[in-house]
Structure formats: C-alpha cells, structure tokens
Image (cartoon, rainbow, N blue to C red):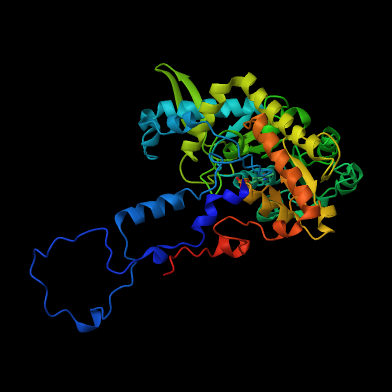
Amino acid sequence: MVDDNPLKHSKNRTLGDLSVSGRSGIQFPSLDVPEQEGLPKELLREEYVKLPELSELDVVRYFTNLSQKNFSVDTNFYPLGSCSMKYNPKINDAVASLPGFARLHPLQENAFIQGSLELMYELQSSLMELTGFSGSSLATLAGAHGELAGVLMIKAYHESNGDSQRNVILIPDSAHGTNPASAAMAGFSVATIPSDSNGNMDVDAVRSLAKDNLAGAMITLPSTLGLFDTSIVEICQIIHEAGGLIYCDGANMNAILGRVRLSDLGFDVVHLNLHKTLSTPHGGGGPGSGPVCVGEKLLTFLPSPVVTKSNGKEGTHFNLSDPVNSIGKVAAFHGNFGVLVRAYAFVRALGLTGLRHVSGDAVLNANYILSSLKDVYKVAFDRKCMHELVLSLSPQKSKGVKALDVSKRLIDYGIHPPTMYFPLVVEEALMIEPTESETKETLDSFIEIMRKIAIECEENPDVILSAPNFAPIGRLDEAMAARRPNLRQVY
Ligand SMILES: *Cc1c(COP(=O)(O)O)cnc(C)c1O
C-alpha cells in the first residue's frame, strides 16, 4: 500500500523542472498601439525574465496537483489531540454563505440586521445552557483571546472589590501554553499546580497555594492529559474559600457536551472554542471564535457587545449592549460572525440529544483506541480517558525511535500526526483525539497501522527513522517553516 503512494512520483517537481524552452500556453495578440520610443535606458530590461515556459495543461496539472497535497480532515484521518479536528458538516458552511449572512456590512443599522442579532442572541443562550452559566459574549475571536478576556474579567472583579493585591493565578502543569501566557498578559503572576501520579491536580498543593494574594485559577477540563479530574469540585471549593475565581479552559468541551454543566462544578467563567467543538473548519490560523460564558459574579464585566432582547410596543427588538462594568471591546464589530452562524446551525441541527451523542461517541472512540493499543504502547495514565488519549513513547525512545519518528511514519500511511510532545509532563507524548465523526472502520485501520508501527520499531526502525518516505518534502525545520516559510518558486 505504502509503496504505491503516488506522492513519491511528484517529489520535488517544480514549474522550473517542467519548463521547455520555446513552449507557450498563450499567444499574445500583435501590438495594436504604436511602440513607445525613448523610454529611459535604465528602466529597460537587458535580459528576458526567466519564467518557466509551459503549456496551459502543464500549468493546470501543476496547480491542481499542488492543491491536492493539502492535508485536511476532508481527505484523511486527522487525530490531532486537543484540536478536535472533527468533520464539519458542509451544510453549516452553506448556511454561513447565505447572502443574507455573508453580505452583511458590519456598520449596518441594528434595525436592518435583526435576524442576525437574533441568531447571536440564540447562540449566546445555547452556550449558556450548555455551560450552565448566566451570561455570554461572542466577541472573542479565538480560544486564547477568550482566555485573555476571562482573566481580565477576573482582574476587574477583584479591583472592583478593592482586592488588587490578588495577583496570582494557579495553573496546572499540564496546561496549554496559552493559559500562562494569557494570565501574564493580564498582569498576573503564575503559580503551578503539579499533577499527582494519577494525572489529577495535587489537591494539597492547591491548598498550600490558596493564600490572600490568590486571584484565581485557570483549569482545563477535561485536562490536556485527556482526563476528567475527579478532584475538580474540591479544588473549586478551596479556591472559592480563599476568595479566588476559577476560569475553565473549555477547549476540550467536545468530551462533555450536554453531560456536564461547568457552573455546577464550581467554575466562574469559561471560553468555548467554536472552531474546535462546534463545527468550523480550522487549522492554519483561523478564522475562529472563542466566546466566553460567565456566572453571576462576572456578568457585568463581559466584553462588549452582548446581544440583548427587549420587548417594546413594536414587538421584540435585539440590541448590541455594553455591560455596565464591561472590560470593553476586545475586537472589531460583532466577533467572527460566519463562525457564529456555523455553530448555531450545528447546535440547532443536533439539539441537546445530538450534542450528547457527540460527546458520548468522542469519548467512546478514544477509549476504543486506548484499549486496542495499550498492550503495545505505554499509556501515560492507565485509566479511562475522555475524548483523547496520551501515549508515552519512552520505551521506544530507549531503542532509538522517538515520538517524532512515529508521527512522521504515520504520514507514510496517509494519517495526520497526533499532537506530539504535549502535554509537557508526559515524556515522548503522543496525544490522539479521534473525535466523534470517525467510523469504526477508520479507527480499526488506524489501530492496525499503529500496531504495525510498533512492530517496525522493534524489527525495522530504519523505515521509521527515514520517514516520511513518500511525502513531497521530508522533515522540515518546523519552527522556521512556520515563522519564515519559503513561498517562492525556485527555478
Ligand atoms: C486550542 C486550545 C487553546 C487555544 O485555542 P485557540 O483558538 O487556538 O487560541 C487553549 N487551550 C486548549 C486546551 C486548547 O486545546
């Protein structure tokens, strides 16, 4: 199967390689204006530009093939942990593209966009129902943006109580890097909550950190270890008793949709990644949306605008409002409206029962993979996982094959690598999130491939160390490829 991979035939072929001197895809018409005389000599080219010379068909094939090298969840399995790269039903894109939504101008009068404001109002209500909170703002444009808005609200809350000495935020050692970054951007210092041997937060450590300077905590639930922290209620109580507020990083909501209301556990504020959990294609930087939902204490601090509803003589009217103690505007206009439309369509199509199926199937699929691989790979914590599982490839590493190598080998089999080396507390971590949308056949095929790779690690490590063996490009300098991509065609 792998040897026939068609990608190997197109390795390193550029337009320059295809160029044949004198070949052309177009014929220019003859000049129908007088030729210009007397242009300054220094502006005239002395040599022809070296452009590739190609037929039209060469160009069409080249770019069509290039477009097919994009990896996406629409083409292959994409188990990128913590990112919920689930299939996003096309109907949601179609709804967001309806001209009445897609062609709105952000400066249109509220009176002319009542339908769109109603959609935002209804989405706020659905997110409040899903989280159990009493207020919501859709203004924030990404998960990390929601985090920043959340901690700024916590800061404004303490300041309004005259508690500006509260300047420490607790964050577990398994957290996504955006959590400490957001807390620091909001001016807090960060103290780390260590994980215990089961992957839960260490309750005693939280107790010892809960002092007068405590502003609150940022906790991911389920954690980025893919685990539901069984101490969460106790930890929220300890933090509340010390006067802190608790932020939930809700990026992993796919695991608990329709089953757990975060407010019931003790959280005060959460962000939801609509582009992960509620159906917007993502990757490559956006657009996304990270609405925040809050309990009573933070209701008046929400970022503006919040959509409100009034019932007057002329009927129901939807307005854009600024909560009284609002931390202010955090983005232009109304948020990423197209993403909001997709989320609304998704929620309405599935309903609460459907959303419960989402989380049920997401967790079932992850546990199916976990139980089918744990005899050949070491699992980071041997207990039931939520929507994702974390393997540790430390035993393979001791034989010379790292988590990175196994990830690269998966590319040979047409599978997107899992998240690697995260969470940081697991050595040689591979974090696998299958999502709810994959069939049992796809999961079985992934399991078979992972088991084959486990054997290769023992018997034929060279084929893993040289992977990807069939992709057009091998191992990139990942940091530089993202920061300074070379997008120029070289001839
Ligand atoms: C993805 C993610 C974030 C950040 O979300 P963005 O939309 O990428 O800013 C934060 N926390 C966790 C746990 C995540 O998985």
Is residue 166 visible in this depiction of the protein?
no
- Using residue 309 as the reference point, say whether residue 446 is left or right of it: right
Which x, y percent locates residue 374? 83, 40
Q: Quadrant of ligand 1?
A: top right
Q: How many marks?
A: 0
Which x, y percent locates residue 204? 92, 44
The quarter of the displayed image where residue 234 is located: top right
Residue 255, above or below 82: above
Camera-side residue of 434 and 311? 434
Residue 17, above or below 317: below
Tell me the residue at 31%/65% (across/down): 53
- Using residue 339 as the reference point, say whether residue 101 is left or right of it: left
Tell me the residue at 63%/51% (across/down): 412
Is residue 348 visible in this depiction of the protein?
yes
Camera-side residue of 205 and 96? 96
Which x, y percent locates residue 359? 68, 28
The quarter of the displayed image where residue 227 is located: top right
- Using residue 134 as the reference point, say whether residue 376 is left or right of it: right
Which x, y percent locates residue 372? 79, 36
Tell me the residue at 53%/39% (across/down): 74
The quarter of the displayed image where residue 1 is located: top right
**Residue lying furthest bottom:** 41
Quarter of the picture holding the C terminus: bottom left
Camera-side residue of 24 and 402? 24
